[in-house]
Image (spheres, rainbow, N blue to C red):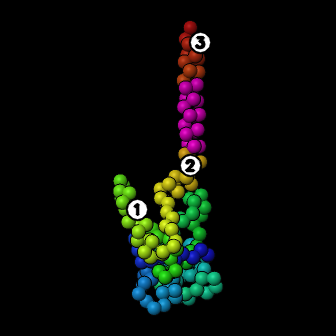
Amino acid sequence: MAAFLVDENFFDLYEIKLKMGRLPVDNDDDMLSQVVLNEAAVRQLHLSQPIGQEIKGQAKGKIVGVVEDFNYQSLHSPVQPMVIYSYPPNFRFVSVKLDDGYDQSILKSLEKAWESLYPGYPMEYFFLDDEIRQLYSDEVQLSLAYNIIFGCCNNYREHWFNWINNVFAD
C-alpha cells in the first residue's frame, strides 16, 4: 500500500474529496497515528466501517477519514490503495499552485523561501502540466496518426464513390 505524507492543504490543492470522517489535524502531538485511506485501501482491507479502526503492518494508525480514489500514477494504471499521513516535519516535496501567466519573480521568491528553510539543498522543481503532457505524449501522437489515416481513408472513400458513380452513370 502506498504511503503519502501530506499537510492539511493537500486535499484542497488537489481537490480531493473527503468521503467520510475527517482529515488529520496537524497540530496534534501524535499526527502519525492519524491516517486517511482512499476508497481502494478500504476495499482492499475489507473495512465496512473504517473510521476508528486501527490498521497495522507497513502502514499503521487509526483511520480518521476516507477520501475518494484519485490517480497519482498514469491513468493507464488502476487506482492503487493508499494511506495518507500528515507529518510536516518529514516533508520532501512542496506543491504550489500558480495562476496562468505567473511572473518569474514568483519562482525567485519560492527559491529564496526554500533556501531559508533548507540551506544547502537546492530547490528542484517541475510543472505538473509538463509532466502530464510528457506522460501522455504517446496518446497525442497516436491520435494524430489516427486522424491522418482516417482523413486519408475518407478521401479515398470519397474518390472511390465518385469513380463508381461516374462508371455506372454512363
Q: Circle 3 sits in a helix, a strand or a loop, which is it?
A: helix
The residue range painted magenta reads 141-157
Q: Residues within 10 Å of mark 1 (few under 14, many from 20)?
A: few
Q: Give the label, 2 or 3, closer to the camera.
A: 2
What residue is rendered at 54% in x and 65% in y?
Answer: 72
**Residue 72 covered by magenta stretch:** no
In the rendered image, the vertical position of residue 154 relative to residue 37, given as above or below: above
What residue is rendered at 51% in x and 73% in y?
Answer: 120
What residue is rendered at 51% in x and 83% in y?
Answer: 35
Nearer the observer, 138 or 97? 97
**Which of the 4 quarters of the picture holds residue 144?**
top right
Left/right placement of residue 120 relative to residue 78 reads left
In the rendered image, the vertical position of residue 156 relative to residue 7, given as above or below: above
Q: Where does the image place residue 36, in percent across and percent down from the top left?
A: 50, 80
Q: Earlier in the sequence, mark 1 or mark 3?
A: 1
Residue receiving disc 3: 167
What residue is rendered at 55% in x and 16% in y?
Answer: 165
Which numbered dot is residue 137?
Answer: 2
Nearer the observer, 143 or 32? 32
Which numbered dot is residue 107?
Answer: 1
Nearer the observer, 22 or 130? 130
The image quadrant where one finds the N terminus is bottom right
